[in-house]
Image (spheres, helix red, strand yellow):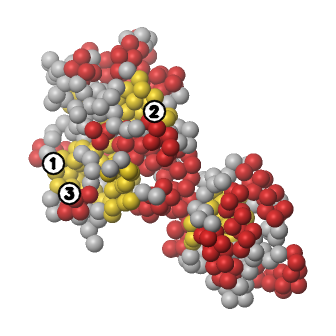
Amino acid sequence: MRKIGLLIFAEGKMREDVYQSRKPAMEREVSRLLEAIGDVLELFRPAAGEIRDKRGLVSAIEESKATNVGAFLFYVPMFVSAATVAMGVRLAGLPCALLGNYARDTFSQVGYLASAGAIEQAGLPYKRVTGDITQESTKSELLSYFRAACADRELLGKTYGMFGGRSLGISTGTADTAQWLQLFGVDLEHIDQLELVRVADTIETSRVARHVKWVKENYGAVCFKEGRFEEKNLERMVRSYLAAKDIIELYQLDFVGIKCQPELSNGYALQCLTVQLLNDLYDADGAKRAVVCSCEADADGALTMEILNLLSDGSPTALQDVYFYDEEVLVLANCGSSASWFAKRSENARENLKEVHLQPHAFGAAGGAATQFTFAPGTYTYARLQRYNLRYRMSIFKGELDALTREDLQQYAWYRPTARVRGVDSRAFAKHFGSNHAHCVAGDYVAELIEFCEIKGFEYFLLNKK
């Protein structure tokens, strides 16, 4: 649950009679606010209570920031000093949302509009939230903004680990270190793929054996094929995953991408198992956090996935290749891996893993397997950060995934984890989507992505059918 500083503004101390006459109505509306959002946001209220002058404002902001709030909700339940509210936005240094109420006996709307105008005169960034907080649409708008604002803040100080560089000439997978630091507060740490091989060969045999045993006991099938996917290939894939896990810890990386093709896929091992297990919420050691990992060292893809991961409070995310689209469906089939969690979306790891078949990969001279399964049906949100003339924009759409059987994969790519998506405007998709990779999270986070783009000043395209 996100921690939000709640600052309640009130009539200034120079008009004590007005404050006292409207205080009962104010307290009623504050109670309605707390009842509406107190169970979905962790609200911190400064000890001083209502803010009625500059000293109270400074004290409240300092106290709130000391508790590590991620954003502020400035509530105007009656007429207030607009100058004090605007100064609060300036002093906060964190995302701020402004909210009033519609009760006629509070004069909140007057204070709300005066405050909004004062903030906008100074060109200060903030979010106007309109409507009564007990209305679901108003509450959803507020929560979407805070999810987006907190995700933006949580990116600050993160490090992306890039194993290798541009893969297969896919230029949209590259990124500018300085641009990322400026726009997102994220650093890029380049790590040669040779380090994966070097560390992989030092992993203790017993540790490797335990993970190989776990794979064989929990996955639906391990489909060995002579010359393409043998015991030695599985061992190298497991070693690669454990090496990546150790390097992530050593370098203190927050999310990563692995080039794989063609050096590792031809010279050591395909990295599909590494990508799957990093993105999952579990491995042979038990429960863990999902570490975003993109295929083909797709930096903008990994950053998109990290944003989706933050918006969804740590849910697994995926990179999927655009396989085919027409007016009815969009078929997404990653070239070899996605988090197994998507197979059933179950909290029970075995329920997800039993749907995954390790199938001999169609490419990669070194040999290895892809993680074959179909994505569980339901609602998913898709996004892609992309650049146009060096400026970031985002494509966004919500999709409903069909229920597919393993046999359905015969008409697409047999070995790939696959999703068939409905609800996408194929013409808009063809016109605006700027990558061969799309990225998803389970659930509906379209509003949060729009808020994120507006916070960052990014253009965005909504690609759903009208």
- 243 in relation to 157, above or below: above
Q: Secondary structure at mark 1?
A: helix
* Residue located 60% across and 57% down the image: 95
Q: Secondary structure at mark 2?
A: strand
Provide residue 337's location: percent of width, then percent of height: 29, 36
Which residue is label 3 attached to? 430
Q: Secondary structure at mark 3?
A: helix
Kind of residue sitting beneath label 3: Ala
Q: How many residues crowd mark 2 within 10 Å: few (<14), some (14–19), many (20+)?
A: many
Which residue is label 2 attached to? 188
Q: CA distance from mark 1 to mark 3?
A: 25 Å
Number of numbered markers: 3
Q: Could you say which is closer to the camera, residue 308 or residue 453?
A: 453
Between discs 1 and 2, the one toward the N terminus? 2
Provide residue 255's location: percent of width, then percent of height: 45, 35
* Quadrant housing residue 121: bottom right
Q: Could you say which is closer to the camera, residue 416 or residue 17?
A: 17
Q: Are marks 1 and 3 in contact (CB under 8 Å)?
A: no
Which residue is label 1 attached to? 408
* Residue located 84% across and 62% down the image: 55
Provide residue 297's location: percent of width, then percent of height: 34, 33
* Quadrant housing residue 363: top left
Between discs 2 and 3, the one toward the N terminus? 2
Q: CA distance from mark 1 to mark 2?
A: 39 Å
Is residue 222 shown to the viewer in this render?
A: no
Drawn side of residue 435 relative to residue 78, left or right: left
Kind of residue sitting beneath label 1: Asp
Q: Are marks 2 and 3 in contact (CB under 8 Å)?
A: no
